[in-house]
Image: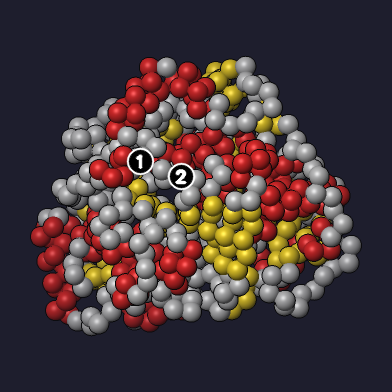
Amino acid sequence: MSTDKNITSVLKETRQFPPQTEFVAQANVNAAERERLAEWAKSDPDGFWAEQGRSLHWFKPWDAVLDWTNVPHAKWFVGGTINASFNCLDRHLAARGNKAAIVWEGEPGDTRTLTYQQLHREVCKFANALKGLGVGKGDRVTIYMPMVPETAVAMLACARIGAMHSVVFGGFSADAVADRNNDAQSKLVITADGGWRRGKVVPLKANVDAALEKSPSVQKCVVLNRCNTAVEMKPGRDVWWHDLVADASADCPAEELDSEHPLFILYTSGSTGKPKGVLHTTGGYLLGTSLTHKWVFDIKEDDVYWCTADVGWITGHSYIVYGPLCNGATVVMYEGAPNQPREDRFWEIVAKYKVTILYTAPTAIRAFIKWGDQHPKAHDLSSLRLLGSVGEPINPEAWIWYHNVIGGGRCPIVDTWWQTETGAIMISPLPGAVATKPGSATKPLPGIQAEVVDKQGHPVPAGSGGFLVVKRPWPSMMRTIYGDDERYKATYWSNYPGVYFTADGARQDEDGYIWVMGRVDDVLNVSGHRLSTMEVESALVQHPKVAEAAVVGRPDDLKGEGIVCFVTLKQGTNPSDELKTELKAHVVHNIGALARPDDVRFSETLPKTRSGKIMRRFLRDIAAGRQTTGDATTLEDFAVLAKLREDDE
């Protein structure tokens, strides 16, 4: 990853929102406590992490908090034994056995609730079933499932017996599933006949059948009947979930595993080149997710918490399954699309279940803006007390809309920065302790030594752009890339020896707040200035007629790169040449002449993955007049690309 030149920061945002007095009064962490924790972590990191680690249940305590002698390979809570499934289930049974663990709603409207006692029973039965199929400690299990409670059951069952799960997002193709099976050498695949998405059944089993023709390591396939669709069952290989667990025992003691025992592999950055199998281990990851969930979301016993991510991504792993269940929380899980059957589905769910904490993505928020305020305003959202943002930097105007329209001006927003590789949230406001600024993830959490540096690794002056790094190991950090340790060292640790390079650009303001400007790859080089695409997008979204924008570069003989803006307008606004001129002037007014767009293109929608991320590499190809390249299997709607190409001709 190149760090040839610092990034020029152009975004100027001065609004600030201090924590409200009523929220501070009941907060898990107030300003004084946060300061105490941060100072403690800085002066005595081992003592700090040891105290935090005691919040988990250990079968055997550790001998050493951290072994960092073999950089960049950290070992946390060395010698301790633990089990993630036990921490998420068994330890809650006495006090929370009858408390709702998962409150689930399917896209067609079917619902289920599993208490901690019921979830424990289902996990134990499925864990025993897996053992009956020959799955044991260290084996790899691929999970390719819809958003149903059984997906969490499968993950926790694997964790219970010491098998490593590899959850593959249900939007991936058969080839992508086969690639991940083969890289992990998976022994078993868990899938479903299908899953509901936008009123249609996604053919998961059919995809698995095609994948298993190219997956020689897979011996068995367990199939959940979710949609009652006809599927082919291969004798000797395929078995129905309900048949498998029918006679399975509900008694399955959790394996006592080493703190560094591998918990899961999760593949990331598969859009170009070979996907990276990020490996996370048990003790440190579980501490990172549970501690940050408690701190950042200010979790209380009676909260109804909804993270809208898919379990196939790290956000789902950390903040639907492991973090919340480790804390004994009630988790809402929804199967389908946010606009099925109407654009108010999310707000209907919030009102129905009296959700108190909502954690979603900026891309979703911008879609809600485009659909119009009338949808959230048609529902009672007064149960909400805290809002969260995850997945990418949030535009200040989207932040303000989220705060005013969804939060009613009363809910703090925790804008969280972290990665698949970090395992847990790294930079975020603590809602009872830190004043927020729209567009900034604010400050690193206690125990996280994140800094913005130049290409030599020196801290940059306040207001200057640079590269985001983490200078000290943390418990939930990835341990390696599965099967490719050299790639792990080269990708994350070679730019700054002994320091983790996030591949994100950022700046730090006079108050010490960090403003993440997006991936270093998403940087425009315009006449020698390296500009963050996120900042140009933010300027566009500030315009009252713009719902969403994606900015990319195209080759330019004079400037190196020209700026091309793909813009989605709010409902009721028509595209025109006059509006193009107006938007170009708007960007110049907000940023300066160096950021004047060369082209503005209107689009009814943008190419996105099913998790809501804009696929900018396709837009770069279209802007440059090239054929689109790379894996498109996670694209939500292939017609979007065709329409953009048609408009380009």
Image location of residue 204, percent across then percent down? 67, 68
Image location of residue 19, percent across then percent down? 26, 43
Image location of residue 233, percent across then percent down? 82, 70
Query: Residue at image x 84%, y 63%?
Result: 243
Within 10 angstroms of label 2, few (less than 14), some, or many (20 or more) residues? some
Within 10 angstroms of label 1, few (less than 14), some, or many (20 or more) residues? few
Foreground residue, 307 or 190?
307
Image location of residue 184, percent across then percent down? 69, 47
- Residue type at mark 2 is Lys
- Residue type at mark 1 is Gln
Query: Residue at image x 33%, y 65%?
Result: 366
Would you say residue 628 is visible in this rendering?
A: no
Left/right placement of residue 88 relative to residue 461 reads: right
Foreground residue, 157 or 252?
252
Question: Is residue 505 positioned above or below 557 on the image?
Answer: above
- Reading the image, the residue beneath label 1 is 26
Mark pair 1, 2: CA separation: 10 Å
Question: Is residue 232 positioned above or below 285 on the image?
Answer: below
- Where disc 2 sits, the SS reads loop
The reply to whether callout 1 and callout 2 are in contact (CB within 8 Å) is: yes
Q: Quadrant of residue 459?
A: top left
The residue lying furthest to the right in this view is 236
- Where disc 1 sits, the SS reads helix
Would you say residue 162 is visible in this rendering?
A: yes
- Reading the image, the residue beneath label 2 is 300
Image quadrant occupied by the N terminus: top left
Foreground residue, 471 or 558?
471
